[in-house]
Image: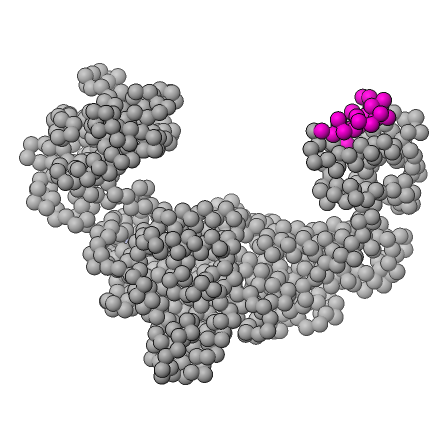
Amino acid sequence: MNKFDLERFEEEAQEQWTHAFESNPSELEKFFLTVAYPYPSGAMHVGHGRTYIVPDVIARFWRMRGRQVLYPMAFHVTGAPVIGISKRIAKKDPKTIHLYRDLYKVPQNVLDEFTDPLTIVRHFAGEYQRVMTACGISIDWRRRFTTVDPTYSKFIEWQWKHLYEAGHVIKGAHPVRYCTVDDNPVGDHDLLEGDKAEVIKFTLVMFRYGDAFIPTATLRPETIHGVTNLWANPGIIYVRVLVDGIPWIISREAAEKLALQDHTVEIENEIAGRDLIDAVVSHPLCGKVPVLPADFVDPDVGSGLVMSVPAHAPFDYIALRDLQHAGRYPGIKPIPLIKVEGYGEIPAQDIVEKNSITSQMDSRMDALTQEIYSAEFSKGKLFERYGGKPVRIARDEVAALMIEKFDSEIMYEFDTRPVVCRCGNKVKIKILHDQWFLKYSDPAWKQQVSDHLGDMALVPPEVRQEFDRTVDWLKDWACTRRVGLGTRFPWDTTQLIEPLSDSTIYMAYYTIAHRIKEIEPGLLTPEVFDYIFLGKESPDLPVKKKLEAMRKEFLFWYPYNFRFSAKDLISNHLTFQLFHHVTIFPRDKLPLGMVVFGMGLLNGAKMSSSKGNVFLLEDAVSEFGADTVRMFLMGSAEPWQDFDWRNDLVISTKKQIERFYNTVLEIKDAHGEPHDIDRWLISRLQSHIERTTAALTNFQTRQALQEAYFGIETDLKWYRRRLPEGCDGSRELHTLCSTWVRLLAPFIPFTGEHLWKQLAGEGLVSFAPWPVAEKNLVNTRIELAEELLSRTVEDIESIKKLIQITPKSITISLAPEWKHEIFLIIAKADDRNMVVKEVMKNDAMRRRGKEATDAVKQCTTLIHRLPPHVVGPLTQERVNEKEVFEAAKGFLEKEFGVPVHITEAESSEHAKAATALPFKPAIIIA
Ligand SMILES: [Zn+2]
């Protein structure tokens, strides 16, 4: 009956948990934690598992610590991806069908209905709930909602009314990522590739060529003074186009891009690249320069032609040098124009030669280019004849001048490529007019967020920098879309609020989600939400009793304590939600903390549903058991570290749980009288409690498991070894079991509930009181004695292995008093370098000479090796080593099967005895 059977434990616990985690305002202190709600368009893999299990372990921990815990969940179904999926399924796209039928295991009759996008999200929302429940995630499911519920839309309308009134919603022309196939702006969620790419503003420098312009795109317009030539690719076909009526020569790709950026573009005719070579062009700021051939010029970057500044651009320098090595264009010399400290007259030449770069293909080229670029921007100055201004000032001035007087235009490009839409099309940059934006560029709004960020708890602390950076560089955000599911944009109902803009304050909605369902959506005016969330009274509020109850819930739960999310959401969601919170809620309702996760790997490679490299969470649970999956995910890495799922390691986790289970059942009913070793066990237990508690308070699930599982297991092994013969444990073991089961319950709650019953614990272990360390049960003297003994046993074992003879006897030789004095001086010393001086103050020590200085060295090494939790107490409490070993003589003789002698090193003849140190006696095996 009591066989280890995770499946049975799961069934038993599920029955008792049905409504257990529904949480209401109470007298207790609250702990409200949230996770970014999932977009249910596919099955959950083990990476998702960790996202929801980490907060669950934390929720269970605080619940046991007596907090009123709320862990809610909802489903984000806003946006276009699911519409694309349903279209692909309708078209019977083989890749999509394969993903959904074979990988996600959707039954054919359900799959047939996936031509309706809402059916997809409803199906997977149900699946998510089922699998999360199977994993033992302690969610209050009464509060579940989706972002297309009519009541939620009313809430979003209210939120946007406030954003609008605060002046954060604006309409304007802006460059946005755009897919010309979908005819829609592209959000982060809509990208297959290139989500880190930023939109960069280039200046087009207009070179005159006959009646036409040849533009080149640059970020460094001030270097116009150093242009020696242009580069054109002889292998491609350029086009002559009328841009706003004026003839330009550019690549075909550039023509397509410019057409999206507020220009009329008409193609006149084609021009072969090779026909441009050796043409002469001119610009008022650099005079006449030739066009030179270069295969490296990419028609898909800028205009497809490049201006060359060999004195300051390593790529240009090498390209020119290569041509000249081949005997061409010998007359062209780099023209320097910027003076920058630390570089010679021609910085590009300088850096290329210093690094012995021979080819443009050298992998260091990008870094060197960046280095010069940064050095010149931060410390460079234009030569006097070009105005003598610092580069950082001259750059903008030259750009402005070119636009005003020399026909320059702006062109937007991505800083990295490729940028690819989910539909497979290359994303372009389009200037949208009449586009609605959230004005994240507003410095005053940024400041409010920065101020609040300073008050927030961020875990791990390193992410603070990333948040600061994000707040700093966030630009205006296109917040509406034409296509998708979601809430209509109140000021233009042909548009929808896009997914990253309707998911920023819904944590507040959780507090009322189960109650608002009872109210007719038509009644949910902005005044209703103003009352619930801001306490603003207004006449004629409907269903006032219900609103009061919701207000009470909100006041009890909000602000949330912690939000958990993967680190790739720092640059959007996690920061956006702060912008929205500071605008809408009063100070005392602003978020308190965030915990940011690392990524999941599967057998060393990044988990990705689209690449098929996933292990489904449900498969993991049915194969290994929910507790195994939980313990593996919590134990293999701290939440913010990346973790790697490997089936072989998961199997050994299952064995660990089984070992824990069997041990508890074996020892729980022991009823012997307690010995010293019991006092040791219980004393050690106090520090395991303390350290597990501290680790979980800091979200260190791995550290907590090390203490709560391995720490206690190792102690128990030693305990059972040290029990007097014929004794199989004392009644203290029952206390230990009760504590142990509770410490592990947040990690393996199914096994926990089953064992809790076996221990006759009261109620559910999920609500049992978290163990508290008791100072009066800590016995440093006994802990140190056992530490000394176990270390000595280890030493004897390793020596035995080394010498490989069958011993006839073992002698333990104890260090003399004067070495104890030295040991104590070193252990207490703040500055261990001063120790020799300190020791030598003493006449008797000085007389010992080399013997004493050697002992100082040896003791120092030893102290370095001992853990702080041993060295600390040793400065307070002297262990009577003789007493310890005399008392353990019987144990040692039993362990090693030979007579054991305990001697003082000073009276020993054996040469080895001289090596005896405090806490590390000499061991002589004969
Ligand atoms: Zn697309």
Q: Is residue 289 left or right of residue 527?
A: left
Residue 695 % position (x, y): 62, 53
Q: Is residue 112 left or right of residue 223?
A: right
Q: Is residue 675 above or below residue 845?
A: below
Give residue 920's position: percent from left, percent from top: 81, 36
Quick check: which quadrant has ligand 1? bottom left
Quadrant in the picture for residue 339: top left
Magenta segment, prevailing SS (helix, strand or loop): helix
Q: Which residues are magenta?
A: 834-859
Q: Residue at x 74, y 55 (%)?
A: 686
Visible residue check, residue 54: yes
Image position of 226 (left or right of 617): left
Residue 395 locus on image (x, y percent): 25, 35
Q: Which residue is drawn at the image coordinates 43% and 78% (left, top)?
A: 517
| The quadrant where residue 925 appears | top right
- Rendered view: 523 above or below 288: below
Query: In front: 215, or 91?
Result: 215
Q: Quadrant of the C terminus?
A: top right
Q: Position of residue 53 (x, y in %)?
A: 55, 59
